[in-house]
Image: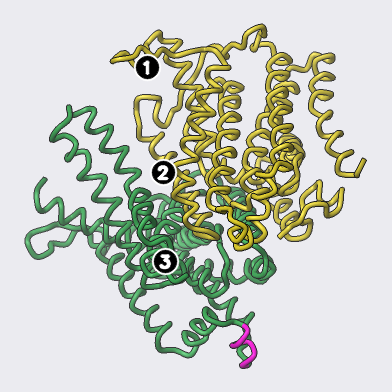
Amino acid sequence: MTREALINLFLFLLLPVTAGAAWLLEEPFIITLTTKVAILALAGVGLNIALGLGGLVSLGHAAFFGIGGYAMGILAAHAQSFDPLMEVTFLIEGTKSMPVIWLVAVIAGALAALAIGALSLRTSGVYFIMITLAFGQMLYYFAISWPAYGGEDGLSIYVRNGFPGLNTLDPIQFFSLAFGVLALVLWFAGRLAAAPFGLALSAARQNAERVETVGMSPYRLRLLAFVISGAITALAGALFADLNRFVSPTMLSWQMSGEIMIFVILGGVGRLYGPVAGAALFILLEHILGGLSDFWHVYLGILLLLVVLFARGGMIGSLAGRAVAHD
Amino acid sequence: MSMLLLIEQVLNGLQFGVMLFLMAAGLTLIFGVMGLINLAHGSLYMVGAFAAAAVAGATGSFVLALIASLIAAAAAGALVELVVIRRLYDRDHLDQVLATFALILIFSEGTRWLFGSFPLFLDIPAALSGPVTLPGGIQYPAYRLLIIAVGLLIAFGLFQLIARTRIGIQIRAGESDREMIAALGVDISRLYTIVFALGAALAGLAGALVGAIQSVQVGMGEPVLILAFVVIVIGGIGSIRGALVGALLVGLTDTLGGVLLPGLFATFMEPSAATAVGSSLASMSIYILMAGVLLFRPTGLYGTT
């Protein structure tokens, strides 16, 4: 077992052990925090497929996170007001069922990523960063100015959505659900990186000309990676909105994109468990530093600066050494 | 829609555009010469506005406030360049994005710590606070006209600086081949600091000028920063001329879109729906403009690959 595999195992067990201990000690707040880590890590795993594997520096992933959140918000709001989404030709009603909401979130996230990716991937480098940022802002302002679903105030849901066989209002059960999704997606992302598609994508990141010469299209590889990445981040968004029972344009803001990116970087770019480590560290810092000072973002900024300048490869990179190619 | 209102809105769009140009010019210079993507540019805008508000509050002089904004932003820029930014030039864009994002966190919270969360107000000098009557009987605020004039003057000055002065020659040479001009004996790291401080000063001035119309508060820089990104993506990264054209396009599109689109939709929709659709589309209009430009010219209007 390599050192990185050991660290991964530790990180994988960290969340359920923390939540389990908090459950035994009857500390529901800690369980909720751990759930938040699992969900934010999920968003980071999504971004990491584009960022780490594909080398696509997207500063607009909040768009997909927010789309997932609004998929949950809109469906659940229609369900709780018994007002169908659509009556003409088809009858489409809202729903309070998580599996349906997740499906809608994933499809909506994938479609948005397809549209944004198809345009943005025509460019590269700095242009790509700025364009993904701009598309994210476009959705943000759209959400603010569109009055039907709460506009700037967002949407509140009275009762958390349901999952067959579980009581999602019980913190430990909702945590198990979120963690189950995270574990499934981590498994999927690990398989994806090792699959021919993942290898081709990594090759396109390292040397696009060579990939093109052997007959594959880097544009298509990247677009597919971007779509998968967007879909996973949207799923995380739906869960995050359900955790808070609230969705607002803040989920679409570019600070959110920055935060998701911070999870990935703090943990380690291109490392499968990087986002888990990053999200856990971020939430931990938020609560330790946030308790010490109202201005904890200063310390977060300084820490982030130090990681970028001196600890390339993030936490996992510093602990496990260079295992993945950093280019 | 009366003609007078339309002309007034065009002037508003121009005013917004020249302010965006002051931001975008620095960003595009810094990218063109150093290859650096600087998210913290909006923080320098904020630093300028806060310095101006503090000095105006202490002395009551608007001119001193503007000078303070230039000096404070240039100094903050030079300091940041010396301590952090110069370690980032040979890093990839991801590292640059993150390090400058970290700088935003430090600047924003640091300013909140120094000045508090409440917005400050910077008063327009009394001589400029009234309207002036333009030919055709249009009443327009004198201060906004001054902003347009200052912006255009700076644009002209910047073109002259780049085209005719020794430092301009070095900047252009640095854009095309930095090893070569270093080999020719130009102190490249001093040049980088100067360019960064120049860009910062322009951002700070924009912050002070706009701060007198809006309020001076933490986080004021980021929305403008993102618009400035849109501007330089449209204009072509590294091109000052592109930044000017892009800034005016974005300023006019944003202002006129907000005025004209709801009215346009009202001609064939019921009023409340027209307002909703129109204002939503208006808030997205500049991004639609950007996507449109990129479809036909992926490197922007004046960009080179």
Q: Is residue A77 above or below residue A326?
A: above
Q: Secondary structure at mark 3?
A: loop
Between B79 and B258, the residue placed more toward the observer is B258
Main secondary structure along the magenta-highlighted residues? helix
Between A90 and A230, the residue placed more toward the observer is A90
Badge 2 or badge 1: first in the primary sequence: 1
Q: Which disc is residue A85 wearing?
A: 1
The residue drawn where x is 75% and y is 23% is A30
Q: Which disc is residue B217 wearing?
A: none
Q: Marks 2 and 1: which is nearer the front?
A: 1
Which quadrant holds the N terminus of chain B? top left
In this rendering, position of residue A242 left or right of residue B162: right
The residue drawn where x is 80% and y is 23% is A16
What shade does chain B have? green
Chain ID of residue with mark 2: A
Q: Is residue A93 above or below residue B23?
A: above
- Do the residues bearing badges 1 and 3 touch, measured as CB atoms within 8 Å? no
Examine the image and state in which quarter residue B234 appears: bottom left
Separation of residues labelled 1 and 3 (CA atoms):
42 Å
Can residue B134 be seen here? The reply is yes
Q: Secondary structure at mark 2?
A: helix
Mark 2 vs mark 1: tell me if same chain: yes
The residue drawn where x is 39% and y is 78% is B158
Q: Position of residue A103 (x, y in %)?
A: 54, 23
Q: Which disc is residue A138 wearing?
A: 2
Q: Report the amino acid beneath label 1.
A: Leu
- The residue tagged 3 is B236
- Do the residues bearing badges 2 and 3 touch, measured as CB atoms within 8 Å? no
Q: Position of residue A114 (x, y in %)?
A: 48, 41
